[in-house]
């Protein structure tokens, strides 16, 4: 019998076991990245360009020009982990959101970190794509 019975406070129901010879299920397509990216400010708003309170930062997709102008906002450590360069990330977030740097400097630190963590995903290199042309 290739079934196991649950124990506990539920009626006994058979649970089918996975076939050990079957390959694991793998998604063929990576999740689609959609831009603009919206990050909700949870702790307090920032002042927008029109002088209104902004509770959601909408980031457009970065370009090569943004990287040339503001620098690469993350580096990859020898352990393979991303490390945020705070000054470059602040400048990049300002450029991508349209919020002026002095206003973005007043963002709650927890909200800044949440936004930076979301924006950094764009800058983590796809090693498969980087090495795809190499033989």
Image: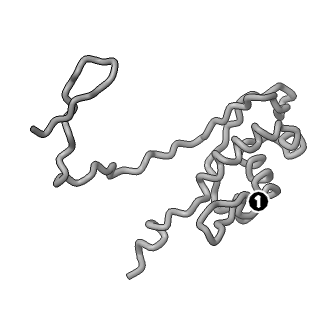
Residue found at the far bottom of this picture: 135
Q: Position of residue 3 (x, y in %)?
A: 16, 35
Q: Check disc 1: other Cα within 10 Å, few if <14, some if 14-19, many if 20+.
A: some
Judge by depth and name the residue closer to the eye, 43 or 88.
Answer: 43
Q: Nearer the viewer, residue 40 or 96?
A: 40
Query: What's the coloring here?
Result: one colour
Question: Circle 1 is placed at which residue position?
Answer: 85
Question: Residue 15 in the image: x percent, y percent?
Answer: 22, 32
Q: How many marks?
A: 1
The x, y position of residue 129, in whole percent, is 45, 66
Q: Is residue 88 above or below residue 15?
A: below
> Which residue is painted at 21% across and 23% down in the image?
13
Residue at the left extreme of this rendering: 1
* Quadrant showing the C terminus: bottom left
The quadrant where residue 109 appears? top right
Quadrant assignment, res 81: bottom right
Q: Secondary structure at mark 1?
A: loop
**63 in relation to 100, above or below:** below
Which of the pair 87/6 is nearer the observer?
6
- Between residues 72 and 26, which one lies in front from this camera angle? 26
In-image side of 107 versus 1 (left or right): right
Residue drawn at (85%, 46%) of the image: 101
User: Quadrant of the image for the N terminus?
Assistant: top left
Residue 76, given in percent of the width and then of the height, sits at: 64, 66
109 vs 24, left or right, is: right
Q: Residue at x 81, y 28 (%)?
A: 44
């Amino acid at each position: 019998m290739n079934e196991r019975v649950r124990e506990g406070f539920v009626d006994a129901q058979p649970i089918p076991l996975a076939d050990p010879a079957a390959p694991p299920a793998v998604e063929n397509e990576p999740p689609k990245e959609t831009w603009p990216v919206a990050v909700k400010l949870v702790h307090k708003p920032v002042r927008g360009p029109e002088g209104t309170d902004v509770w959601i930062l909408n980031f457009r997709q970065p370009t090569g020009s943004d990287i040339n102008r503001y620098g690469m906002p993350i580096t990859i450590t020898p352990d393979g982990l991303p490390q945020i360069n705070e000054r470059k990330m602040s400048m990049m977030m300002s450029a991508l959101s349209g919020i002026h740097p002095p206003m973005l400097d007043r963002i709650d630190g927890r909200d800044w970190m949440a936004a930076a963590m979301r924006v950094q995903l764009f800058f983590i290199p796809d090693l498969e794509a980087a090495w795809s042309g190499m033989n």
